[in-house]
Amino acid sequence: MAQGYRSRLFRDDGVVLRVQRLGESDRIITLLTRRTGRIRAVARGVRRTSSKFGARLEPFGHVELQIAEGRAGLHTVAQAEAVELYAGRITQDYPSYTAASAVAETAERLTPVESEPALRLFQLTLGALRALAVREHAPPLVLDAYFLRAMTTAGWAPALTECAVCATPGPHRAFSVPSGGSVCPACQPPGAARPAPATLGLMAALTSGDWKRADASDVGIRREASGLVAAHLQWHLERALRSLPLVDRTMKE
Amino acid sequence: MYEGAIQDLIDELGQLPGIGPKSAQRLAFHILSADPADVHRLAGALNRVKELVRFCNLCFNVAESDTCRICRDPRRGTEVICVVEEPKDVVAIEKTGEFRGRYHVLGGAINPLEGIGPDQLRVRELLTRLRDGEVKELILATDPNTEGEATATYLALLIKPMGLSVTRLASGLPVGGDLEYADEITLGRAFEGRRAL
Ligand SMILES: [Zn+2]
Ligand SMILES: [Zn+2]
């Protein structure tokens, strides 16, 4: 360790996306922050039961942080205060936990460059975790709404009304992931899906936040929408999401 | 980058959990400069652990025969099973002296971010053990952190319909810690104060 190296301290608030064990009792915390984008920081001694951090650096929490800037992109958590911790409520419900895990993994994957601000994605991520904690809507719907909106911020949301290729106003019956969403009869490639019209309607409702319509949708339509949303997301990500096959989409009546 | 054997060792050490490239390099050079007798003992211990240590057929704790010492002990009750994540948690609970039943070691906790779901853990084997109706209580002693709590939630949902009592260690354990770091008194109290799920 170089002598006399004084690291700069900065403050920000963020959500904990992932925690990984480091050595005997430390953890590397991956956070999506409001102003600094995605960062990684070491929390020392956090796994000891006497840790001053306690539950504050568990996944899915919204925390106010003081960070000591480190070299090579690995910072150190100097202080952490809870704004709102969601893990306790999220882990009481298994579908919420698996959905929250997929939200966290997606947020990490959509911020490939560290320390690059991603304010809209931060807000969406925080909103999705809060919604999963309070269980206002079915967890799979919250997850699909998050996927659709996160894809919108990334610039590759599926076309739902107009044709993805020629922009002819729809609604159109065919949907093609490689083409970018719903497609008109002229642009439709072979093998395009033909989802129920209500499925594209549900996807539009989830994108715009029309929860009244989304909550009223039936289970079959939700399943079909989930399939299309997941296929669209995976198409644009280089590697598959590890958490996606483990998402529990059991619908409670 | 180094050449040959020393780089091979750095690469191998770097595969271990919690060991980054710098630590791997530091360990490798420590081994290189260590007394040959010490290094032989380390190599021997590494070889023996894979040759001799197996997992108990019943509870998946570490064992040196088909079943572990605890499962073979006739004084241990068969009506209560305590579910833990890792063999080191068995050691931590044994130290409290509070538990006289048997264990089931899951081999981790459900963590979708790492691709670990119920099928990657010894959940099916647990259900098999519960099928004959001899077990009356299942104590969920997964870590008091996010993954451990979620695993307990999942198991409770799965097992409660089988009609046995499912309990969770008392919440006196600080959240965010590892079970192995809880002191014996706190962990002992958590056992006494376990609550039904
Ligand atoms: Zn078209
Ligand atoms: Zn055993």
Image: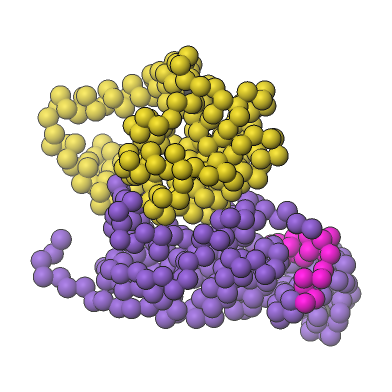
Chain colours: A purple, B yellow
Figure quadrant of the C terminus of chain A? bottom right
The residue shown at (25%, 49%) is B23
- Magenta residue span: A212-233
Whether the magenta-drawn stretch holds residue A43 is answered as no
- At a point 77% along the width and 70% down the height, the residue shown is A215
Q: Depth check: B178 or A206 in front?
A: B178
Q: Nearer the viewer, residue A195 or B174?
A: B174
Horizontal and vertical percent position of residue A8: 23, 76
Residue B118 appears in view: no
Q: Position of residue B167 (x, y in %)?
A: 55, 41
Most foreground residue, B113 or A126? A126
Whole-percent x, y for residue B97 in the image: 37, 29
Q: Quick check: B72 above or below A107? A: above
Judged by its main secondary structure, the magenta piece is helix
User: What residue do we see at 30% from left, 53% from top?
Assistant: A50
Q: Position of residue B134 (x, y in %)?
A: 63, 23
Query: In the rendered view, would you say B85 is above or below B133?
Result: below
Query: Where, quadrant-wise, is the N terminus of chain A in this rendering?
Result: bottom left
Residue A248 visible within the image = yes
The structure residue drawn at horizontal position 69% and vertical position 35%, both measured from the top left corner, is B163
The quadrant holding residue A127 is: bottom right
Q: Left or right: B77 with respect to B49?
A: right
Q: Per the image, is A227 magenta?
A: yes
The quadrant holding residue A55 is: bottom left
Q: Hey, which residue is sitting farthest front in the picture?
A: B193
Counting labels gives: 0
In this view, the residue in front, B5 or A169, is A169
> Which picture quadrant has residue A163?
bottom right
Note whether A127 is above or below B59 in the view shown: below
Taking A65 as reference, is A185 left or right? right
